[in-house]
Image: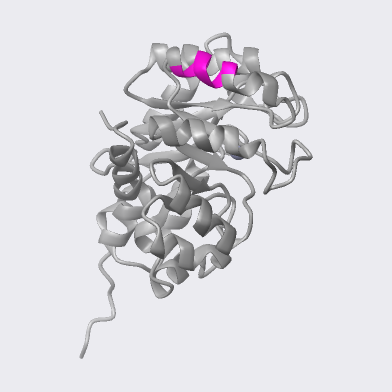
């Protein structure tokens, strides 16, 4: 009689035991730090919020996080970027800090991008929808240009449609376009352009992860928990339990992100 016992891979075994994924590379490509008055933000109640976040990452086995401020979508980005500069100074091996810019103020965008770059931030966060700014607006090109010049990743909350993104990725080929909330309409451009990838944020629907394999975009998707909006375990859980191979889980958890960061010269 055939055995029906399925051997679980080391990732699921570790997660089920409630242990950190210490034997795997885990990179969370969507993290925040700071206060936001519309949400409960646990770590910001502590004086040393950065240290609390690091402890949380250690608890889960997250090696590195791409991080930007909480609240940059509604508040003055400058003091919020300072918070990220401080986090990167304290934990340079754990965080890749992104500069938040407000697309409605092109006259100060370059100054802020340069200031933060000089102080150690190595990515750009763009969120046109929350800034009530068109996803194909002119001011976005200020950020695209800067990212291209310095080979930076950009985490973009909402993007123009696939064909337009394809043209942008071709024009700004040294920058990396991270689709902040991946959806399947971008599959073709993700497959075709090395500098386009999708972040798996807030999509824990049954079958969703398995579909990345079917759609052949498993090499171009990265986990992003949206911590501290959500617990960082929110990024890992759906991958651990997905019905995909151990190797594919390793890609989503960290290997794909490593390749992207290496492309930008940001892996250390
Ligand atoms: Zn977020």
Viewer-side residue, 207 vs 113: 113
**Left or right: where 31 falls relative to 161:** left
Near-viewer residue (114 or 30):
114
The answer to whether residue 5 is left or right of residue 130 is left
Answer with the quarter of the image where residue 141 lies: top right
Q: Residue at x 37, y 62 (%)?
A: 218
Ligand 1 picture quarter: top right
> Is residue 43 visible to the viewer in this orientation of the structure?
yes
- Give residue 190's position: percent from left, percent from top: 44, 60
Residue 179 position in % (x across, y down): 53, 50
Above or below, 159 against 207 in this view is above
The residue at the point 40 percent across, 12 percent down is 90
Is residue 217 magenta-colored? no
Most prominent secondary structure in the magenta stretch?
helix
Q: Does 151 appear above or below 187?
A: above
Q: Decide if residue 268 is on the left or right side of residue 243.
A: left
């Amino acid at each position: 009689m055939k055995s029906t016992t399925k051997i679980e891979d080391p990732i699921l075994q570790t997660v089920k035991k409630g242990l950190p994924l210490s034997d795997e590379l885990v990179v969370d490509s969507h993290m925040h730090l700071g206060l936001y008055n519309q949400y409960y933000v646990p770590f910001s109640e502590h004086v040393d919020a950065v240290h609390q976040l690091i402890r949380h990452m250690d608890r889960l086995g997250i090696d590195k996080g791409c991080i930007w401020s909480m609240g940059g979508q509604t508040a003055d980005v400058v003091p919020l970027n300072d918070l990220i500069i401080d986090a990167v100074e304290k934990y340079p091996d754990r965080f890749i800090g992104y500069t938040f810019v407000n697309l409605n103020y092109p006259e100060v965008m370059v100054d802020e991008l340069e200031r933060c770059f000089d102080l150690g931030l190595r990515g750009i966060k763009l969120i046109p929808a929350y800034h009530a700014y068109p996803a194909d607006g002119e001011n976005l090109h200020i950020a695209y240009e800067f990212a291209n010049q310095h080979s930076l990743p950009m985490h973009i909350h909402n993007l123009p449609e696939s064909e337009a993104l394809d043209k942008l990725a071709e024009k700004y080929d040294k920058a990396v376009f991270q689709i902040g909330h991946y959806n399947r309409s971008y599959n073709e451009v993700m497959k075709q352009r090395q500098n386009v990838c999708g972040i798996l944020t807030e999509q824990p629907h049954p079958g969703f992860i398995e579909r990345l394999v079917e759609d052949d975009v498993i090499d171009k998707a990265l986990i992003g928990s949206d911590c501290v909006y959500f617990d960082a375990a929110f990024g890992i859980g759906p991958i651990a339990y997905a019905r995909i191979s151990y190797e594919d889980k390793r890609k989503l958890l960290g290997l794909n992100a490593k390749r992207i960061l290496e492309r930008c010269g940001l892996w250390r």
